[in-house]
Amino acid sequence: MKKGKVIGIVAIKGGVGKTTVASSLAAELANRFGQKVLLVDANYSSPHVAMHMNIDKPAKTIHDVLSGKIRTSNAVHSRYGVDVIPGNEFGSLKFNALKLKDRIKQVQDKYNYVIIDASPSFNDELLSTVIAADSLIMVSTPDTPTLSSSIKTAMLAKHRGTPVHGIIINKIRDPRYELTLADMENETDLPVIARIRDDENLVKALYMRMPITVLKKNSHFSKQMNAIARALTGKHQDIGWFREIFGLKFKPEEVNREIIREYYESPIR
Ligand SMILES: Nc1ncnc2c1ncn2[C@@H]1O[C@H](COP(=O)(O)OP(=O)(O)OP(=O)(O)O)[C@@H](O)[C@H]1O
Ligand SMILES: [Mg+2]
């Protein structure tokens, strides 16, 4: 198989939804698009992929891989159609995180996609994802403190030369008092690729330790993951028969997802 695409889910901010996006997008790519997917927890200080993917006290983790104890393939757990390398919540951090790229390379040709759930800490933890990834997806909430972190994340990616597909604006609650798509795009100079409302189904998903795209594929959150997965796998956006018949215009984030699709369609990729 051709080497898989490595996509990092990033934000220099905790709690914005990185792990939720990483795990549900990985499951969507695997289960509805027939892709072979590896999900890697690169939030070494505070790893939560295991909780989202129903892995209880993993015996083999990314910590063991990075400290050279085991090979990458030996840390793989299979859940919900996805190969997962979880982290060890209480594991020692005495390793060089920047070896992540090299460790992923050991297995990259077995996968179509490697999704990395990044750390929010502005240090080597996050840098390991930015360096290992071919491209990044940023997650942000629509408030000014998070926006300033998003600007910083965009600068880091640019400095390291890792392309950013765009921003997912997550947990939208009341647009009257929140930053708009235009605010986010103007300030970060990045396209918005999805706008996701605060979705109560996520509480149940976390409780069930199940990606929302597996638990409830028709939820708002899952539909947004489906749209991103479509773009990443080179498929046109599904705007629905109603909008097609009435010739309704594409939303800005739909246009931006078409750009991702074209990026992957390009013969030089
Ligand atoms: N759109 C949403 N609506 C409601 N709840 C959400 C949404 N997205 C994420 N959440 C919830 O927000 C919480 C934080 O999400 P998550 O753990 O994915 O964030 P994170 O960015 O990975 O955090 P950390 O930086 O600490 O790793 C979780 O309880 C999750 O279920
Ligand atoms: Mg997380």
Image: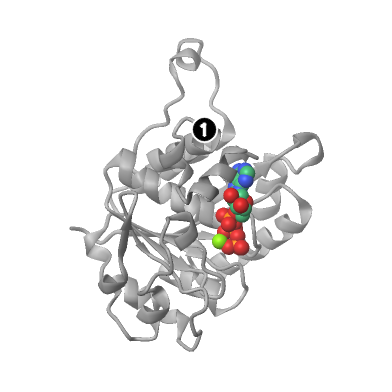
Who's the residue at 75% across and 43% down the image? 179
Q: Is residue 236 above or below residue 190?
A: above
Circle 1: element type: loop
The N terminus, quarter of image: bottom left
Q: Is residue 96 above or below residue 9?
A: below
State the residue in front, 114 or 198: 198
Q: Quadrant of residue 64?
A: bottom left
Q: Which residue is mark 1?
A: 219
Specify the color scheme.
Answer: one colour
Who's the residue at 33% across and 38% down the image? 32
Q: Give the farthest residue toward the bottom.
A: 94
Q: Is any atom of residue 142 visible in this view?
A: yes
Q: Is any atom of residue 169 visible in this view?
A: no
Q: Is residue 157 left or right of residue 235?
A: right
Q: Is residue 117 left or right of residue 113?
A: right
Q: Is residue 174 above or below residue 12?
A: above
Tag 1: Cα neighbours inside 10 Å, few (<14), some, or many (≥20)?
some
Q: Give the farthest residue toward the top.
A: 246
Q: Quadrant of residue 101?
A: bottom left
Ligand 2 shown in quarter: bottom right
Q: Amino acid at mark 1?
A: Ser
State the residue in front, 181 or 220: 220
Who's the residue at 77% across and 58% down the image? 145
The C terminus, quarter of image: bottom left
* Residue 41, percent from left and from top: 45, 66
* Residue 38, percent from left and from top: 33, 59
Who's the residue at 45% across and 53% down the image? 23
State the residue in front, 226 or 198: 198
* Residue 249, percent from left and from top: 55, 22
